[in-house]
Amino acid sequence: MAKRKRSPEKRSMGRRQLLRGLGTAALALPFMRSFVAHGQLRATPKLLVFATPNAFLVGPRGTADYPGWLPTALHTGTGYAEAPASNPLTGILAPLEPHRSKLVMIDGLHGVSSVGSHQQTAAMLTGTGVYGDEAPRASGGDGEWYANGESVDQLIARTIGSRVLGLAFHIDGFQLGEGYISHLGPNRGFTPIQNPVDAFDRVFGAATGDPAAAARIARQRSVLDSIAHDIGSLQRRLPAADRARLDAHLDSVHALEADLVAPASCDGGAIAPGTYDYRSSANLPRLMRDYSRIMVQSLVCGYTRVGFLQTGNLGGGYRPSWPEFGISTTYSDHAIAHKFVGEAGAGSDGLSQAAAIPLGLNVQKAYNTLFAELIEQLSTTMDTDGSPMIDNTIVLHVKQMGENHNKERLFWIMAGGANLGIRTGRFIRLPSTSPYRYVNDLHVALCHAMGVTDVDQFGLSTMNHGPLDLS
C-alpha cells in the first residue's frame, strides 16, 4: 500500500510523527484498570512473556559439539509426540534444571509464513502479518514492522480487565520494529517501559511518598496533556478516517492520565532499583533482574495480571559482554547468531565459527538463567490462595526464530500454570509435516487457560487448527 503523500503544514507535528509519538509515549503507559483486589482469597490467573533475541541456535537433536534440546525418545518420527522431562536438563537448558517439573518445552511451533524471519517479532504474539503500509528500510520505509492485529497479551488483558505491564532493555538500533512484540491492534505497537526507575515509579511511585517519584509522575501527566492538546488541534486538519483513529488515541490518553497514580495497595515491601547505566549492554542482566522483581511485586499487589519482559530489540543488536556468564566479546548477539552456523552477518567480520559456538551457547545459557531466576521468584512468592504464584501464572520464554533464522520450527519454553490446567514436566514435539501447529494454536490455548474461553481462533484464520492441548 502506497503511503499517503503528506501535504505541507504550518504545524511542526505531522501525522506520521504524531502517531509514532503516541506509540512511544502515550501507548507505553497501561490504561486499563485491574479488577484484582489485594488480599482476596481466590488467586487469579496470570500471564507473563519473557522474550529474548534471535533463536536458541542449537538444533533440537544437537550435534557432536553440543547437546540439543529434545530427549532421545523424540529424535525419531515426524508427528506429534511427548516425552517426560525425566533426565537432567543439559546444554543451554541446564540453568532450568531446578524447575524441570514446572516446564513444558514445545518444539516445532510454526511462525507466520507470510512474513520474514526477523518480522516474526511482530507476528509471534499476534499471529498476523505486518501492517500493510510499513515498508522496510531498504525500500525507503521506517522499518517499524507493526503487526496487523492485536497481540494475545493485550487481548487477554482487555478481556479480563487488567493492564499490560511491558518492561524492556532499550529497543533502539537495527529495524526498530523488532522492539515491538505487543500490539494494541493493527499498526499500534505497544512500547514497553525502558527504564527501571520509571518501571518502579509506575507501580509503586505514588504509594512510596517519594517526592522525586511524584515529580516524575507530574511531568508524565504534563506530557500527556500536551499530547492530548496536539491531537485535538490536529483532528480538524485530517480526513474522517484519520480523525476516527485519533479519537481512539485521545480516549487512551485521557485514561492514561487517570492511571498514572499507582494503586494504594502497591506499597509494602517494594525494593527500588539502584542507580546504574541501564542502557549499557554490560548491565542487561542486572536490568532484567530488577524488572523481574518489579514484575513479580506488581503481580502480588494486583497492579497487573499480564506482562512481558524483553531483552531489548529482538534483532539482538547489543553486545552480550557478561563475565558472570563466561562471556566477554565486542560482537553483537546478532553477529554471534550468524557465525554460530557459519554464516556472515552484520558486524560479524573477524569472528570465526569456532569462537562463535561457545559464545552462542553461553549467551543462551545466560538467557535461560535469567528466565530460571524469574521462575524461582514466582515459586517462592505466595499468591492470595496460599499457593506458590508460579502455579497460577503461565510464563512463556519466546524467540522470534528457531534454529538460526528458521521460522518454521520455533522452540518455546513454558513454565507454571499447574492450577490453570497446564500439565508440566514434559517435552512436546509438534508435527514437522502438514498440518502444522502454529503460534496461533498456542495462543488460543493460552486464552482458555486464562479464562478467556470464547476465543476459538486467533490471528490469521488460515493458521488455526484448534487450541494446543496443554492439559
Image (cartoon, rainbow, N blue to C red):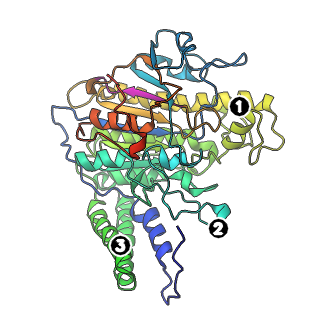
Determine the residue positioned at 48% across, 53% down. Answer: 195
Viewer-side label of 2, 1: 2
Residue nearer the viewer, 125 or 275: 125
**Within-10-Å neighbours for mark 3: few <14, some 14–19, many 20+:** many
Q: Which image quarter is the C terminus in?
A: top left
Which residue is identified by label 2?
140
> Secondary structure beneath disc 3?
helix
Residue 161, position as x, y percentages in the image: 23, 49
Q: Which residue is mark 1?
A: 359
Residue under circle 3?
246
Gap between marks 3 and 2, in whole Å? 25 Å
Q: Report the magenta residues as a range.
A: 410-418
| Label 1–label 3 contact, CB within 8 A | no
Query: What amino acid is found at the position of numbered circle 2 in the picture?
Result: Gly
Residue at the location (50% across, 73% down)? Answer: 17
Q: Which picture quadrant has residue 393?
A: top left
Q: Which residue sits furthest right? A: 350
Looking at the picture, tell me which residue is in the foreground, 98 or 313: 313
Q: Position of residue 362 (x, y in %)?
A: 65, 28
| Residue reaching furthest to the front | 434
